[in-house]
Each structure stands twice: as C-alpha cells, then as structure tokens.
Image (tube, grey):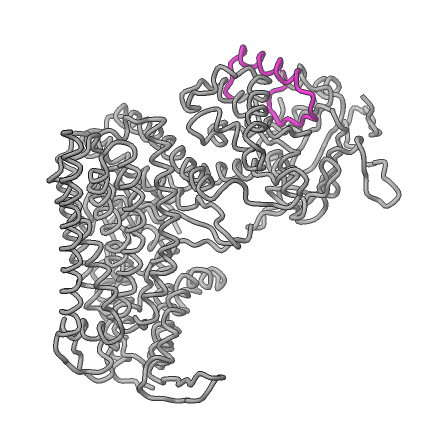
C-alpha cells in the first residue's frame, strides 16, 4: 500500500457507494442475500487486513439505532409470533418488527464493513483528492484536507488540556476519592473555557499557516492536491462496480425472503 | 473516569433510512451548501485565509467534541458544536465546516453512513449551524443585544439545535419505518433536552471566553445594539413560530399522526417485499389529524405575537419616558 | 542529603541501584520514600512498551533531574506520578499513598504537574481564575481561595498579572502562571516537564532562581544539562523505558561516555 496520498480512489469510492446502495435496497428479510453479500465483503475485508476487533468497534456506532428500533417488536401488530403476559402487562412480539430489526442491523453491519475497506485501502488524503476529481467543490476539498492534516494535532492539544484540568481536579481536604468539584454551571463554564482557549490556539495557528502558505507563493484558492496518477483501468473498475450492484440486487430479487 | 458520555450521537448509519428520505435530504443539503459556498465567496476575507481557518476550525470542532464535564451519576455533558461553529465562523462558513466534519466522521470513523450523509449533515450541520446562527442572532436582538443578549441567544440556539437535530433524526427514522415514533420521539427529545442544556452551557462558556480574551474575532458576527421594537417583534415572532411549529410537529407525531404524515407525503410502496416498510398500513386517510394540530400551533403563535406586541409597546413607553 | 542507594562509579557507567530500605510489611513509608516507584511497567493500548520496570525512590524535599532523550519514557513516567496513567504492572506511591482510584482525589492535590506547554494548562479568561481553579474545585470557601491564589501568584512573582488574560502574556510569564496554578493547591511534590524549553538564557536564569525558592520535592524532566547542573544535586537518567543511571548530577555530567551513550550529548 503506497501512502503517497495521491492515489486515484475514484473507482473505489464509486464501488463503495454502489455496493452500499445495493445493500440498502435489498428487500427486508432477504437473509440469504445478506449472507452472500456479507461473505463477499468479509472476504475482501480480511484480504485488506482489517482486524475483526476493529470492525466490531466501528460497527458499535449503529448500536443505539438498533436499540431505537427494538420497540417495533412490541408496537407493531402484524405477524404476531408470540403473545403473552409479563406481570400485569400483555405483550405481543411482531414478526414483522423482528424482520425489520434484523434487516437494518445486518445492512448497517455490512455497510460499515464496506466503508471500512475503503479507508483501509486508500489513505484519507487520496480519498479527498479523488472526491475533488469527482467534482467536490474546491473549498470543501481543501478545507477537509486541512482538517485531516491538523486533526491529530488539535486532538492531542485537547487531550493535554483535559489532562491539565483533571490534574487540578482534586477532592476536598479530608477526602481522597475523586469528586466532581464546584457547581454544575461552573464546571460547564470551565469546559466552555477549554473550548474557547482551544479555539484561540487554533485561530492563531491558522494565521501562522496562512502566512506560511502565502510566503510560499500560494494565492487565490490555496488548492493543494490534485491526483498525481489517474487510474488507467478506471472504466473497467466502474463497470465492475455496476456489475456488483446488479449482482447484489439480483440476489435480493431472486433469493427467497423470510 | 468511566463516565457515560451523553454525546448527541445522531449520526444515522447506512441501512436505516428509506432511499426517498435519504435522497430528499441530500438534495436539501446540496442546495444549502451550494448557497453557502457562493455566499462565503462574497465575504471580505481573502480566500486562502478563509479556507485555512475553515480547515483548522474543522479540526477544532473534532477536538472540542472531546471536552466534557460531569453532570451527575456518571453522565457527562458534551459538545456537538454546530452553533459554536456558526457564531465563530459565520453561518455559511460554519455550515460548510460542520458538513466537512460530519463527512470526515463518516469516512474516517464510520460514524454515520455514507448514503445517509446528506441527512446527517442536514440534521446536525445545516439546521444546527445555519438555523442555529439565525436563531441566535434573532434571539440576542430580542433580548437587547450586548453581552447578555448574545449569551441568551447563543445558549437558546444551541439547545434548540440539539433538540431539532434529535427530533428530525427520529422523524426520518420513523418515516423510514426503522423506529417507533410514539416511543422514539419522546425518548429522544427527552434525553436531548438535557444534552442540549450541556451544549448550551458549553457554547456560552466558549463564546464568553473568546469575547473576553479576543473580542475582535467575534465583533463581525454579533449585533452590538438591541433592535428596534418592530424588528424585535418580527424576530421574536419568527423564533416563536419556528419553535412552536417544531413542537406542534413533534407533538402531532403520535403513531397515528406520523403514519398520516407519511401517507400524505405519498410514500406508498406496493411492491413485493419492499426495501423499507414505509407504510405499515397502506391506507390513505384524511388530513384531519395533522391539519388540526398545525392550526393549533398557528393559534399559539398568534397568542405569542400579541404578547410580544404588548411587551414591545411597554418597552417603548418606558424608553421614551 | 541522604541517599540510600549503593552505586559504583565504574567507567562502564553509573548503574542504577537496586537496594531499597523497606518497612517490615514490604511497603516503604515515610519521608525517605516520598515518591516510590516499584517495578513500574507501562504498556500503551497499542502494545508499545513505554516503561520496562522502573524502580525509583525520592526522599521528601529532594530535588531530582530526570534526564534522557526523547522517547526514553520521561513524560510517560511523569504522568504516572499524579495518576493520569496507571501502571500495567508495579506500583506508584506518592506522599505516603498508593496511587489508585481510592486516592486519586488527594493525589492530585499532593502532586502538582507543570506541563511542557503552559498553554495546555491555562484555560481561563484571567490569570486569577486559572490559579483559582484548583482551590475552587477542592471546595474551599471564597476567602481560602483568595488567600491561596495570592500566595501562589506571589511565590512566582506574578501578582501583577492577576487580571490579565493568560494568552497575552510572554512565554516566561505564562510558565510562571502555569506553576502558580498548581502551587495554589499546596502540593508537596512538584513535577515539571521540560521547564526550560523555549526560554532564552535570561529566562533560564530566572527559572533556576525560581526553582531554588521552592521547598517542595521536585522532579524535573529536561534535556537541558546546564539546568540540571545548576539546580539539581541528583540526576536520574532514563533510556528505553528503563533507568540507566542514578547519581549525583556532577558525577553524571562528568561521564561523557555515559552522556553520549544515552543521547544526552
């Protein structure tokens, strides 16, 4: 994997979007199709060197939304698969609700996996550069590039500031355990101060970066980063992506649903 | 510090929104961001400086979302930063920055899906930043401008932006059939009412710090004076209208109400094994439920406007006295 | 200054000593071990081993320089002293307490950490508020807070800066204020991370003077050999996550081979 930051990721981006779209359009309850797609995606993921642990961690983002879907089990009244009493409450479990929950959870899982493959195979700078080539507006692409460039730096500053705050967050005299100090409004104000102070540092840094950039001769749009190499086989890859879309959709249409 | 962070985690993953909903919001987002790009090109600052500031502000938003404070019983308040971005950078540049932040979160961390990115940007970046900035400015003018008005405006807008984002997210999920509105909406709005307070307090603190330490950064963004009485009334009415309409919309979103909304908007999918269960019942009843609620909301707004008119008259009399 | 280590001054190098006086129950106590690290190992979540078995003890009131190149583990070690990091193995005792969740609230008051970049710890609109943060968090009443802030600012010679915004101060002033923000908590141990970084010779002179006025136990990590020589009678050299030397500063600085071997010269 060459980390030049200027690889042509356009085909990969299009493939990612088409596969994700195909998965999203799969009918509810087509578990066989989900399984097949998942197998294919999981194979690619494993080949790309994505650790299962990382995938699981990233997929956790979908968990609150799966939880938010759970009530559908009980509130929908179609396809009752169980009805009974829990104490004084009478409950029914809807098969349709269950299907929806399983479907969305599986679709979300597969989509996260696909998205993870994209950023594993291509450095984020290449992805932004490729998006620019795909007509993402210049301002957004440049701004995003700068954000990515300074992301770790600013987050480390934030971490150190948080450490500095906790280093001075002692408990009252006579106590030894950690205790939140001051009043809630005071704590919130201090947190706001942290954000404000960090912004002023970022603002000053932006001024320095801009000075340095103009000193090096950047004028006008300060655009840095076109693609250094265009993919010669991009048309073939795009065709493959369309084929994948068709295949997945066909699986959804043809394979039995439950 | 094993706290449960009450982060406004509203990044919808792929697979949870119906394609129609997703597309509609992509269009809305694209339109707004397009307008934003044109608007910032007309600003006085030079392009490199502006772009650099926007880029680094994006990294700042990421970092600032790590800041928290303990609230109670192991929970903590966090920052989403939409209104903060709008106040610090201006509503248009702020929206673009939030859009790129949300986009990078989706790409780099899979925090939010790619197909539903338009919806996420709309909920957290457009409504929060653009709407929030306008509400902040309007509210601060209503409250007399100056520091106090600014803090009230910013705080209220920050709270409202979190509530609006939570409500809109849940509505979109509900219309797509992936959550039960009757349970989800009260739950989301309830929890985010608290989270929104954290957002408001942190945003006020940040703005307070910056206006104390480097006021020149903010001076271009805020109105120093209070507005004239008629303008105050107009602005106040608009704010009231927005708030009441949102409240009416959410209040009307009982399970029946929402199905009617979805049906009224025509999400009828009668194909075999639909991709999304958009209409659990496949019926098209009349509009009564929704219309009556909206009428009620309009009456409420009317009452608020009358009150503001009276207040404005009192204020004017006091000023000229 | 009593030093319970045994060490040899062989030309091969000044090695760390391993004998420590212990109380009967195996737990060292008292002023001799005001800071006591025993078999301290620390591994980052990504698997990097940063500290590979640190044994160190420092008596109350001692002033020790922590020397070593970047990556030796000095900062990682310092972040253990007030509990920001917890050991993967081994123990950390400060001011008679084992650093743990039960004691962290008190540890933070006893151990004052001064970061390398003062901007990391100055986050209030005025100097006064920054110095007052610690005492306020501790729940002291307004009068006590006021007294502590005044005393801390006086100790660093920054009383006249009280109402200024920290961001507008010079680097030297910010470093002094940063120190004041921890002094107001009345710690018995002060830990500095590269205090002379970014200071010109005059700034360093003022820093040395200031360090000389402090009565607390001092642990100061630095590359600055001149600072070590001027202000610290004892130096501990770290390398690759271990202690490679622990001796009077003069002896260490005289051993050119040692300095070269461990990236100090």
Could you tell whether A40 is left or right of B50 in the image?
right
Q: Is residue A19 visible?
A: no
Residue C123 picture location, percent across and down: 45, 32
Q: Is residue B263 visible?
A: yes
The image quadrant that residue B138 belongs to is: top left
Q: Residue at x 52, y 32 (%)?
A: C133
Work out whether A54 lies above or below B222: below
The count of marks equals: 0
Work out whether A8 lies above or below C126: below
* Magenta stretch encompasses residue C223: yes
Quarter of the picture containing the C terminus of chain A is: bottom left
Give the farthest residue toward the front.
B321
Could you tell whether C68 is left or right of B91 in the image?
right
Could you tell whether B212 is left or right of C129 in the image?
left
Q: Residue at x 83, y 26 (%)?
A: C8
The image quadrant that residue A79 belongs to is: bottom left
* Magenta stretch encompasses residue B185: no
Could you tell whether A244 is left or right of B76 in the image?
left
Residue B107 picture location, percent across and down: 33, 54
Q: Residue at x 43, y 45 (%)?
A: B66
Nearer the observer, A8 or B312: B312
Residue A216 picture location, percent across and down: 27, 25
Nearer the observer, A141 or C256: A141
The image quadrant that residue C249 belongs to is: top right
Residue A124 picture location, percent across and down: 34, 49
Residue range highlighted in magenta: C198-226
Work out whether A9 lies above or below B202: below
Nearer the observer, C198 or B75: B75
């Amino acid at each position: 994997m060459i980390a030049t930051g200027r690889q042509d990721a356009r085909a990969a981006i299009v493939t990612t979007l088409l596969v994700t779209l195909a998965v999203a359009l799969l009918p509810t309850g087509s578990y066989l199709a989900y399984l097949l797609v998942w197998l294919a995606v999981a194979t690619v993921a494993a080949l790309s060197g994505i650790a299962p642990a990382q995938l699981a961690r990233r997929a956790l983002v979908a968990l609150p939304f799966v939880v938010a879907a759970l009530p559908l089990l009980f509130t929908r009244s179609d396809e009752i698969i169980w009805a009974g009493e829990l104490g004084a409450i009478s409950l029914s479990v809807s098969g349709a609700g269950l299907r929806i929950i399983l479907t969305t959870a599986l679709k979300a899982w597969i989509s996260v996996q696909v998205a993870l493959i994209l950023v594993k195979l291509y450095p984020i700078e290449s992805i932004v550069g490729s998006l620019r080539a795909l007509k993402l507006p210049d301002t957004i692409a440049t701004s995003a590039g700068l954000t990515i460039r300074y992301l770790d730096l600013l987050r480390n500053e934030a971490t150190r500031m948080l450490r500095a705050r906790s280093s001075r967050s002692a408990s009252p005299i006579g106590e030894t355990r950690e205790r939140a100090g001051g009043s809630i409004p005071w704590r919130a104000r201090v947190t706001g101060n942290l954000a404000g102070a960090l912004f002023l540092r970022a603002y000053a840094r932006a001024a320095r970066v801009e000075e340095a950039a103009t000193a090096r001769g950047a004028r006008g749009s300060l655009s840095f980063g076109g693609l250094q190499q265009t993919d010669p086989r991009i048309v073939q890859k795009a065709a493959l992506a369309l084929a994948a879309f068709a295949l997945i959709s066909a699986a959804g249409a043809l394979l039995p649903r439950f | 510090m094993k706290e449960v962070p009450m982060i406004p985690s509203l990044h919808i993953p792929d697979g949870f929104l119906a394609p129609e909903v997703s597309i509609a919001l992509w269009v809305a987002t694209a339109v707004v961001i397009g307008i934003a790009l044109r608007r910032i090109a007309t600003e006085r600052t030079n392009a490199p400086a502006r772009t650099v500031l926007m880029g680094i502000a994006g990294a700042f938003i990421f970092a600032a979302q790590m800041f928290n404070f303990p609230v109670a019983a192991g929970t903590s308040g966090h920052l989403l930063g939409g209104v903060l971005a709008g106040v610090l950078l201006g509503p248009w540049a702020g929206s673009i920055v939030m859009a790129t932040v949300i986009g990078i979160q989706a790409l780099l961390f899979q925090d939010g899906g790619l197909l539903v990115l338009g919806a996420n940007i709309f909920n957290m970046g457009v409504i929060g930043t653009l709407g929030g900035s306008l509400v902040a400015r309007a509210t601060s003018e209503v409250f007399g401008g100056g520091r106090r008005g600014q803090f009230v405006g910013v705080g209220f807008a920050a709270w409202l932006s979190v509530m609006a984002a939570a409500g809109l997210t849940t509505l979109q999920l509900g219309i797509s059939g992936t959550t039960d509105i009757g349970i989800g909406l009260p739950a989301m709005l309830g929890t985010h009412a608290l989270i929104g307070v954290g957002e408001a307090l942190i945003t006020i603190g940040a703005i307070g710090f910056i206006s104390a330490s480097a006021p020149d950064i903010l001076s271009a963004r805020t109105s120093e004076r209070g507005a004239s009485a008629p303008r105050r009334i107009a602005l106040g009415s608009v704010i009231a209208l927005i708030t009441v309409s949102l409240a009416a919309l959410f209040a009307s979103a009982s399970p029946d109400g929402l199905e009617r909304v979805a049906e009224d908007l025509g999400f009828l999918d009668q194909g075999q094994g639909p991709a999304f269960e958009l209409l659990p019942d496949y019926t098209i009843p009349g509009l009564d439920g929704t219309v009556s609620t909206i009428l009620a909301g309009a009456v409420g707004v009317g009452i608020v406007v009358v009150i503001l008119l009276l207040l404005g008259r009192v204020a004017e009399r006091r000023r000229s006295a | 200054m009593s030093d319970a280590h045994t060490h040899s001054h062989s030309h091969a190098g000044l090695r760390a000593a391993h004998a420590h006086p212990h109380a009967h129950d195996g737990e060292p106590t008292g002023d001799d071990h005001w800071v006591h690290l025993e078999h301290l190992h620390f591994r980052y979540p990504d698997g990097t081993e940063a500290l590979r078995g640190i044994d160190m003890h420092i008596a109350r009131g001692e002033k020790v320089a922590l020397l070593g190149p970047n990556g030796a583990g000095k900062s990682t070690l310092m972040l253990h002293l007030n509990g920001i990091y917890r050991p993967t193995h081994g123990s950390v005792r400060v001011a008679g307490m084992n650093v743990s969740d039960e004691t962290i609230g008190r540890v933070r008051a006893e151990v004052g950490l001064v970061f390398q970049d003062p901007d990391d710890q100055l986050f209030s609109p005025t100097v006064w508020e920054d110095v007052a943060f610690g005492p306020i968090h501790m729940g002291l009443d307004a009068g006590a807070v006021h007294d502590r802030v005044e005393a801390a600012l006086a100790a660093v010679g920054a009383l006249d800066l009280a109402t200024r915004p920290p961001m507008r101060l010079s680097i030297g002033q910010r470093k002094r204020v940063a120190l004041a923000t921890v002094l107001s908590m009345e710690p018995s141990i002060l830990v500095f991370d590269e205090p002379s970084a970014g200071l010109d010779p005059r700034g360093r002179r003022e820093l040395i003077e200031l360090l000389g006025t402090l009565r607390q136990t001092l642990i100061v990590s630095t590359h600055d050999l001149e600072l070590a020589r001027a202000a610290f009678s004892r130096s501990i050299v770290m390398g690759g996550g271990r202690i490679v030397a622990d001796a009077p500063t003069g002896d260490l600085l005289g051993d050119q081979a040692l300095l070269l071997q461990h990236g100090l010269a």
